[in-house]
Image (spheres, helix red, strand yellow):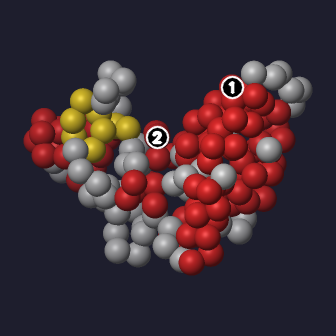
Amino acid sequence: MIDEYRVILDRARARHAETLKQARHLSKLNKKNYDQKVWEIHEEVFASIDCTKCGNCCRALGPRFRHTDVKIICKAIGEDPRSFTKEYLKDDEEGVGYVLKELPCPFLNEDNTCREYELRTLSCREYPHTLSRGIQKHLVRLAHDSLICPAASLILDRLL
């Protein structure tokens, strides 16, 4: 990870308690056109953030794998879904598919690119969830993501 992104995450960690408090408060409100505002900020922030200079989400979180994700990836890489699941995955505690047994993600390359980018899971495609509908109700999740993802941190800074 580049130093610039490390500084952003350090700042997010230092302010996390206050950020959580603000996110909880704001998530209870019902601001009009909030999703659109977040989407605009998302586009602006990601115009200057290069995920391949970070890769922290792949090192610290890893994706959630739905059964569909497992089937698609295994078909493409020529691996049996049962073998893949046994080697790399465990049941998700929330009961929604699987998570990785170990981090970093086995698809993460040395240069922070994804070996299976075109086939990546839905959770990878959606991370850090700032293009989701109803994002205002999920600002606490975004506050937690801001400890992992520099872009999420910058987006949340602008929202708060």
Residue 30, horizontal then vertical, whole percent: 83, 21
Which quadrant, please, contains the C terminus?
top right
What is the quadrant of residue 129 in the picture? Answer: top right
Mark 1, residue position: 137
Residue 73, horizontal then vertical, whole percent: 30, 46
User: What amino acid does circle 2 point to?
Assistant: Ser
At horizontal 35% and vertical 32% (from top left) the residue drawn is 66
**Local SS, label 2:** helix
In front of the other: label 2 or label 1? 1
User: What amino acid does circle 1 point to?
Assistant: Lys
Q: Is residue 58 left or right of residue 46?
A: left
What is the quadrant of residue 159 in the picture? Answer: top right
**Could you say which disc has been placed on residue 35 in the image?**
none
Q: Is residue 9 left or right of residue 108?
A: right
How packed mark 2 is, by other alpha carbons closer than 10 Å (few <14, some 14-19, many 20 or more), is some
- In this orientation, which residue lies closer to the viewer: 62 or 29? 29
- In this orientation, which residue lies closer to the viewer: 11 or 152? 11
The answer, for residue 50, to whether it is visible in the render is no
Mark 2, residue position: 123
Residue 21, horizontal then vertical, whole percent: 69, 35
At horizontal 37% and vertical 38% (from top left) the residue drawn is 64
Could you give the CA–CA distance between mark 2 and mark 1, rounded to whole angstroms?
18 Å
